[in-house]
Image (cartoon, helix red, strand yellow):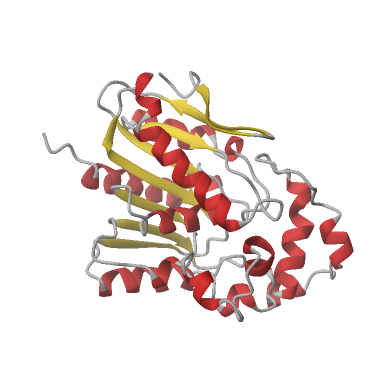
Amino acid sequence: MSCRDKETRTYKQLSQGAIQADIYYEGSGSPVIVYIHGGALIFGTRAWLPAEQIERYTSAGFSVVNIDYRLAPETKLQDIVQDIQDALAWVRTTALQWYDFDVERLAVIGSSAGGYLSLLSGTWTSKPKAIVSFYGYGDIKGDWYTRPSAFYCSRPTVSRDEAFSHTGDRELTDGPFDRFPFYLYCRQQGTWVREVSGMDPLLRGHAVSAFNPVELITPAYPPALLLHGDQDTDVPCEQSVQMYERLLVKGIPAKLVTIEGAEHAFDNQFDQPVVQQAFDAVIDFLKLHLQSEA
């Protein structure tokens, strides 16, 4: 199955609709990548994964399961996390009736908020075998997310009423970019954690810690590759550096790739040589850590 031959399946049925995944199957026994899109958990869709990236993975022999999930603030972080856990469980069980990929060789890859969810997946009981985070974040309790952002405060102020006018009252899994003002409001106010999780990180820090990867690393954490642009104005590069250093302290095989001069979402500039080199590193990392033990 090539990048042009995707199949779409429902991995979770809700009362208000289905949550779906696109599957790019590369044959019996192939290792599998579960991809999680970004968008601050507020907007975005699986359709954001560029065809060039899908082709890069599938041409290297990896099956890809590209998932949607419910979005905030209509759905809170706890239920979003449950969606990701349910997607991984679906890949490992139900999906096998159609695709006999090797679920013992499963990696999770995500960008931005998807990178955060990917890093969080390494803290669960049922873990992937490897994790790749593109400009993700490991510390949602840090000042960068819980206090007003100087970068976003330089933009015109978004009022609370305007912010919430871009949200709704029913769950959704396909969030258009016109929801961005709600994210901008959260960053200007330093309230992303509270609005997305329903928990105040200052008043319920212990509860938020259950969703904070950097606090949850154990010696059982999977090997991880972190990629980040050093000029990222949305998610500070220090987020990947901090996670990388903590992984090393815990003895986890980890690698950090810093892209000099790169901003957020640098991987969308796929034709750039430095981005091609970054994807070479991703493929090498996946092949190393998803090797067959047969």
Classify the position of the N terminus by image quarter. Answer: top left
Q: How many marks?
A: 0
Q: Where's residue 104, x and y in %?
A: 25, 38
Q: Nearer the viewer, residue 286 or 102?
A: 102
Q: Is 167 in front, or is 24?
A: 167
Q: Position of residue 7 (x, y in %)?
A: 50, 21
**Residue appearing at x 52%, y 37% in the figure:** 67
**Above or below: residue 260 compared with residue 72:** below
Picture quarter with the C terminus:
top left
Extreme-front residue of the structure:
15
- Is any atom of residue 269 visible in this view? no
Can residue 90 be spotted in the picture?
yes
Q: Give the side of residue 247 with respect to residue 112, left or right.
A: left
Residue, x 30% and y 27% (percent of image)? 101
In the image: residue 148, left or right of residue 282: right
Q: Is residue 260 above or below residue 126?
A: below
Q: Residue at x 57, y 61 (%)?
A: 263
Q: Position of residue 92 (x, y in %)?
A: 34, 34
Q: Position of residue 23 (x, y in %)?
A: 46, 27
